[in-house]
Amino acid sequence: MTDHSTLAAHLERLAGGRVLCVGDVMLDRYLSGEVERISPEAPVPVLKVAAEEAMLGGAGNVVRNLSALGAEAVFAAVVGDDAAGREVAALLAGARGIEARLVVEKGRMTGIKTRLIAASQHLLRADRETLAPIAGRTRGALMRAVAEALPGVGVMVLSDYGKGVLGAPLTRALIAAAREAGKRVIVDPKGSDYRRYRGASVITPNRRELAAATGLATGSDEEVAAASRRLMERIGVDAVLATRGGDGMTLVVGAGRRETVRHLRAEAREVFDVSGAGDTVVATLAAALAAGVPLADAARLANVAAGIVVGKVGTAVAHPDELVHALHARDLLTGEAKVMALAPAVERLATWRRSGLKVGFTNGCFDLLHPGHVSLLAQARAACDRLVVGLNSDASVARLKGRGRPIQGEAARAAVLASLATVDLVVIFAEDTPIRLIEALRPDVLVKGSDYRLDEVVGGDLVRSYGGRVLLAELVAGHSTSATIARMAK
């Protein structure tokens, strides 16, 4: 079994992968807020909307995940000649590393899924979509776009949401073209008749889909392996990666004496939302295979990524930094990966805010943690629902405090902070001030010690400009890291 260090090393290669994704794109809308009363018009909750967000859904979520992982994606899909289609195009144009090859079909409605959320709970989902095969002219245009893109990619993904793009004739033609070009094909299937996927390299059904496609039970490890084996025999695919929710995944490769079966246990510690987890699995698997990672290791990375996104609200993505932290989670002093880079931290805050939580921020060197630090952090946490601590890097501390500092390295200082119940997230920054973090995180409460004046607090004006507040915490006299070090020197 490959160790976590080897898997983490694979992540550095993902940026070299290039993946072609073909499938059903849609627009995911999220209306989030609070429910405080029942409607007088009908026995239904009234959602007081506080935020609205739109993001790429369906196959679009696969390319979002590819982008987050650092891989390059070519996206071939069909949209309608409507406002939602134009919004999809705009989202793709603004995304890093995604080359969009959209085909516009007049008269077709671009799919929209609108979700209403309160306190991390889904209240309702409303769908607007066209459920019909795409026109012959559209199929031809899509096939030409794929043919042009195939030579420059390592893997092709077919993300089938059953909306009409990946009908049987086009799916067979796409797989044939990819195999003729020597490219692997990963299929995220839909329905129960998988004959159109014949010749694919890897197919990724969930437990329910696998049972429907084979007519076999899929409860135990042995049953999932047997059903995967049956599916491979029926449709002639090289491997099956069956996703099993809380039971993890099962990878079956080959046949007879060459068959290998691996059961990968679920990595999730806390599940908020399973929306889009299958897209994350497919994207991670594809990015890894395109970068030359062996299939077994690619499946393990996909399993870790799935464990990350189900801990977020909405159709989320997994970042390489989060995968690294998850792979090394057993080495952390805290049971949760509270230490993360800025990009995943911004995502974590978005999840908190969808739940109506108030976010606080404070920062410092926190070298040789003492009671004064503990008091400051306790006061900061009391003023918010979640507290983020910006931690000066070793280089930053050396510039601010002088030669010989810090006493403890940034990894040790971060681990100590993360072990405190008052701290929910730690982000290390290399600059002399935390202004870049404050601009990106936009905390509701900014906390510093009372040895500062309000006009001296870095980022104070910014936080107040959007309605946040600045809090000066009371200091505990007689405690100082510098004084402690001086006493030790004597």
Image (cartoon, rainbow, N blue to C red):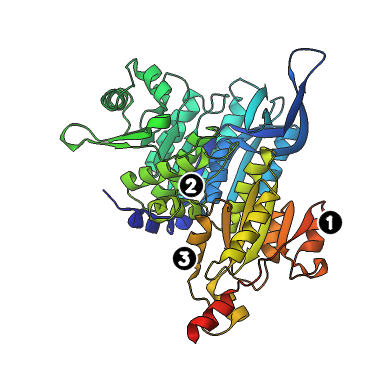
Q: In the rendered structure, which amino acid carries the disc numbered 3? A: Ala
- Report helix, strand or loop for mark 3: helix
Query: Could you say where residue 354 lies in the image, as x and y percent from the top left?
Result: 67, 39
Query: Could you say where residue 200 lies in the image, as x and y percent from the top left?
Result: 37, 34
- Corner quadrant of residue 78: top right
Residues at discs 2 and 3 in contact (Cβ within 8 Å): no
Give the left or right position of residue 466, taking residue 228 as reference: right
Q: Residues within 10 Å of mark 1 (few under 14, many from 20)?
A: few
Residue that numbered label 1 is attached to: 465
Residue that numbered label 2 is attached to: 19
- Name, please, the residue furthest toward the top: 42
- Report helix, strand or loop for mark 2: strand
- Corner quadrant of residue 449: bottom right
Q: Nearer the viewer, residue 63 or 362?
A: 362
Q: Residues within 10 Å of mark 2 (few under 14, many from 20)?
A: many
- Corner quadrant of residue 61: top right
Residue that numbered label 3 is attached to: 412
**Could you tell me if residue 83 is visible in this image?**
yes
